Image: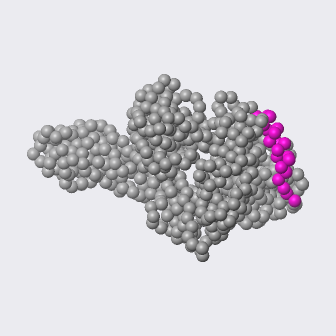
Amino acid sequence: MLRVDSREFRMIRRLLLLAVTVLSGLGASALGQHQRLSTLFASDNVGTDGGAVYFDLANLQPVLLQDLELNLDAPIGTAFQVAVHALPLGMSHVGNEASAAWSTIAVDDGVARSLGVDRPTPVSLLAPALLPAGTRGIAVVVTGAAQRYTNGNGVNQSYSDATLTLTLGAASTTPFQLPLFAPRVWNGSVGYTPVTGLHPAFHASPRTGPAPLVVTFTDATTTVDPAGLVSILWDIDGDGVFEYSGPTAQHVYQTGGTYTVRHKVTDALHGTLTDTRSDYVVVGPVAPRFTWSANGTTPTTIQFVDASTPTPSSWAWDFDDDGNVDSTLQNPVFAYPRPGIWRARLTVTAPAGNFSTVDSVRVGVLPLSEFTSSYSFPTNVRGFWFTAPRRFSIVGARVPNETGLALQNLAIYRMAAAPSAVPVITSPAFLALAAPADREVPLTLSFETGEHVGVLGAMGDAATMVNSYGSAPFNTQLFGTSLVLSRLRADVNLVTSAGIAPIATGGGPLGRVELAVTPAAAFAYGTGTASGSGASAPTLAPAQLPMLGQTGSVTLTQGDANTFGALMLAFARGNLPTPFGTILLDPSTLFSFGIGAVVPGQNTVSLPVPNQLSFQGVGPVCLQVVLAVAGSPNVLALSNGVEWQLGL
């Protein structure tokens, strides 16, 4: 019978703590960034429900195994269970699939649901598994669905990154029993974090049920401090009071509801970190839960999967938390109109009543380093900066709120040069102060290739700034193009300084701010030509971004009376002088659209954008307005130009 050998785990953990060198000077923020190593999701074979797939996992440094992705032969929404087993360090799965040495190192958290064949199904583990440096055999066993895999051919049997190597593999219909089918390539991915600091973690059982509900909490923290933890505290209802201490705690929930749990751990090397999990314990007849992932049909299409237990009788989905029901299917697909940090609400119905849950759905959000700690100071705000590797726009932002505060503050800068250790006073291109917590702050800010983008953000108010820290520098990608996020700092309070800040860079963690991004962009360029009547030249400015399937728009500001206009469109910039002014578009690709009468002041000029994915990233599309001004010396007035890049 397979079991978790706690004595062996404690021995391995002690050896790990002695073997790992603590990174000096980085403190609690020295946790490595979350990484993922994938095999493939192109199956040509399938196992059986309850079967096992085997492979070897080698890691050059200690890691925390945190989550998996699987390829399952099951309809969308199918519930299943996962167990991960390992052989002792140094023992390969080859020739040992039927060994008695296998032990369970991790199980799923009970929430995962299948996303179908040849699509990655995400699986979070109930508690991370600590893997010391070295090689060992791994077995993944799935109950409730069959695992799909690929026949090995000698070329497709090894995958590696800078830390891990996966060597594949074999399969069996019954775990740890012959006959064996080989070679077989597990279809999946391993999500992990290198262990270089203090990493708080815990799990609880049960997490759902009717009142009174007895829940046992178990610490699963890892630390490289050889002395281990000096304090473990539990706040079991999110009220800020830590009711229990020690590696385990048991609490009886007498009242129905949804409870946030805070778990605070301390060691001598790294200080104190807190792991906060919102809506972690649900007391009632039905626990509403759901998962979501990219559908793959468009960049903003999301597959939602109900994970409520027990299965409710009906579902009501509000995908943007606006109070309107958008779907009553159990596992719907929804296309958001743009990238963003959306709030989705699921309300389920059971004989005992209705029960709801809300979760953030991050669509097109720039990947950030994992949360490591919070940093609070009255006049310090932190963030990150990077050089834009391509044109793009920011359409939403949010400061992560691990401390449960009510207000968020953020500033985005268009910096004239890359920041240095010497502070430079800089004014923000966008500023949001005292915005409600946990919700996206919408904005539209486009950046050209090569521009330096600065982001600062913190929870709090004029009295204090609370920063969400992550590791830096952090390697990420913007629409498939690599970039590096580096630390940005300003020793001011964003609220009292109105975002005008002495910006500098340097060593240490970055401040985390989530950014929703799109390849759609719009830029004003050139100068217009006045009619000669005394009014200034008309100006054209970007308004609504040219997103696929929506309407892009520009704002025309002009001062002439009794004018009629036309919108000119071309696929490149130009510079063609005429007796009436300079045409700023390429004449060889010029189109013209009448826009009718134009009033003095501001006017909105709109143009529908085709809903075709083949137009993703298409550009430039250049716009200019020409006005007929009766009785004026020049007869016509021409605006400056606006250049669009299409996208979603």
Q: Which residues are magenta?
A: 1-20
Residue at the limit of the structure toward the left, as seen here: 631
Reply above or below: 277 against 32.
below
Residue at the limit of the structure toward the right, as seen here: 100
- Is 9 one of the magenta-colored residues? yes
Task: Looking at the picture, tell me which residue is in the foreground, 598 or 385.
Answer: 385
Name the residue rendered at 81%, 54% in the picture: 104
Give the percent coordinates (x, y) of residue 297: 53, 59
Q: Is residue 638 visible?
A: no
Give the percent coordinates (x, y) of residue 372: 62, 41
Give the percent coordinates (x, y) of residue 6: 83, 49
- Is 412 one of the magenta-colored residues? no
Q: Quadrant of the N terminus?
A: bottom right
* Labels in figure, total: 0
Name the residue rendered at 58%, 57% in the picture: 293
Name the residue rendered at 33%, 54% in the picture: 607
Q: What type of secondary structure mainly makes up the magenta span?
A: helix
Question: Relative to 440, is 79 on the left or the right?
Answer: right
Name the residue rendered at 27%, 37% in the picture: 527
Residue at the limit of the structure toward the top, as seen here: 422
Quadrant of residue 123 in the image? bottom right
Q: Is residue 238 visible?
A: yes
Reply above or below: 369 against 48.
above
Question: Relative to 262, is 595 on the left or the right?
Answer: left
